[in-house]
Image: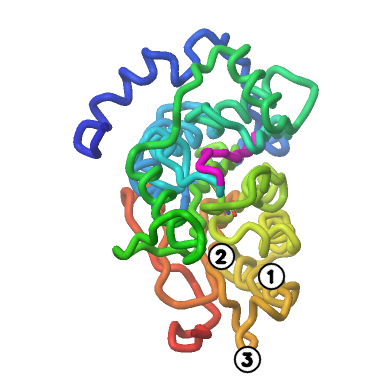
């Protein structure tokens, strides 16, 4: 099994082996500016905390002139191809039947285009498949076996995404499900709760061109066919080149009902800064949450984080409870910063 130390060295070999499609012809990008005067922004990349390595890669690319979506996707590819990140791509935690099903979506601000795939199996880089849907079809979203077939037609190489570690975690979860079934209970330490993990990344160039991408293996142990927020344009990510970009990680079911990424961009359009916009989105999510997911104090029982980047290069991350962080890279380098929050950690329902 590939370990973390080997991973970076083998990433280029993975590309050469076909996990990243090399045969696709480059699409012409249409980087534009708003109005007659060229817009000047602070180049910046913002992501979920697991994007700390990726924001540096994406930032280096945008300052070198790479299209912001290509740069952001290069950033999230690092996690998609990392077998030790169990929230995305290769090594992602599987569904209830032990099958890894991935979701991803992206938006390209300058050309106002979007692409998405959902429940795709066997392809480690669904972010690139989402971009291929955007680049090569008249559609926005492809799902399930058809998305897989499309990816293979476009030159992606299918592979088994279930690493030994994720398979062991799934077997232990299954063994603990029912004390009366034929599987002997695993008595070691295993978290049988559902896990959600994801990577969202948003980028703005010096010219003010923007992009966003979100990719995930979704909720662990999910009902096969479950679709989270990541592939939903306006929920898992959203980008408007005139305003900003936003995205989310965490419990997708909570976010879908609030169209959180779209709402964040709309709040920024109305003049709110990224932090205030995201906190208002979090409040809207809670207002739209069913009682079973709220504690007696009305606080949510789940985790959900939002990230926003305005066209001028200002940014924020926000969540319900104190303690979360997000990744950013700008002229000060790649680093983790603290998310804004609504409640102290002690207010979280048990
Ligand atoms: N936010 C990732 C998911 O819920 O699938």
Q: Residue at x 56, y 65 (%)?
A: 304
Give yes or no for residue 99 being in the magenta stretch. Answer: yes
Q: Considering the numbered disc 1 on the image, is that residue within a helix, a strand or a loop?
A: helix
Q: Which residue is mark 2?
A: 304
Whether the residue carrying mark 2 lies under 8 Å from ligand 1 is answered with: yes
* Magenta extent: 97-109
Q: Which residue is mark 1?
A: 285
Residue 137 x %, y %:
75, 20
Q: Considering the numbered disc 3 on the image, is that residue within a helix, a strand or a loop?
A: loop
Q: Residue at x 50, y 30 (%)?
A: 125
Is 235 in front, or is 269?
Answer: 235
Kindly tell me whether residue 288 is visible in this rendering. Answer: yes
Q: Residue at x 66, y 55 (%)?
A: 261
Q: Which residue is mark 3?
A: 296
Dot 3 or dot 2, earlier in sequence: 3
Q: In the drawing, does residue 63 fall left or right of residue 214? A: left
Mark 1 crowd level (few <14, some 14–19, many ≥20, 10 Å Cα): many
Q: Please say if the residues under marks 1 and 3 sit with CB atoms less than 8 Å apart.
A: no
In the picture, residue 267 is in which quadrant? bottom right
Dot 2 or dot 1, earlier in sequence: 1
C-alpha gap between disc 1 and disc 3:
17 Å
Is 221 in front, or is 47?
Answer: 221
């Amino acid at each position: 099994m590939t370990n973390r130390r080997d991973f970076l060295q083998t990433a280029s070999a993975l590309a050469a082996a076909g996990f990243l499609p090399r045969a696709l012809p480059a699409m012409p990008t249409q980087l534009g500016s708003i109005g007659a005067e060229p817009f000047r922004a602070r180049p910046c990349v913002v992501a979920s905390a697991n994007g700390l390595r990726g924001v540096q890669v994406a930032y280096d690319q945008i300052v070198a002139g790479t299209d912001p979506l290509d740069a952001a996707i290069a950033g999230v590819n690092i996690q998609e191809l990392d077998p030790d990140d169990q929230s995305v791509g290769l090594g992602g935690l599987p569904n209830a039947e032990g099958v890894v099903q991935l979701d991803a979506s992206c938006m390209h601000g300058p050309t106002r285009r979007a692409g998405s795939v959902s429940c795709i199996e066997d392809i480690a880089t669904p972010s690139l498949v989402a971009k291929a849907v955007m680049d090569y079809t008249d559609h926005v979203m492809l799902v399930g076996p058809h998305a897989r077939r499309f990816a293979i037609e476009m030159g992606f190489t299918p592979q088994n995404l279930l690493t030994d570690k994720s398979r062991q975690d799934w077997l232990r979860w299954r063994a603990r499900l029912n004390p009366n079934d034929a599987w002997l209970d695993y008595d070691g330490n295993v978290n049988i709760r559902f896990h959600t993990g994801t990577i969202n990344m948003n980028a703005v160039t010096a010219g003010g061109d923007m992009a966003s991408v979100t990719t995930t293996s979704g909720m662990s142990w999910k009902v096969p066919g479950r679709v989270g927020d990541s592939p939903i344009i306006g929920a898992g990510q959203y980008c408007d080149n005139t305003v900003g970009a936003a995205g989310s990680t965490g419990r997708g079911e909570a976010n879908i009902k609030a169209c959180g990424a779209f709402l964040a961009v709309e709040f920024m359009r109305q003049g709110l800064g990224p932090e205030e916009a995201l906190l208002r989105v979090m409040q809207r999510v809670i207002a739209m949450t069913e009682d079973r997911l709220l504690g007696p104090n009305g606080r949510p029982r789940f985790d959900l984080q939002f990230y926003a980047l305005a066209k001028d290069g200002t940014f924020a991350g926000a969540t319900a409870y104190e303690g979360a962080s997000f990744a950013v890279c700008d002229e000060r380098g790649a680093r983790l910063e603290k998310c804004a929050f609504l409640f102290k950690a002690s207010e979280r329902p048990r």
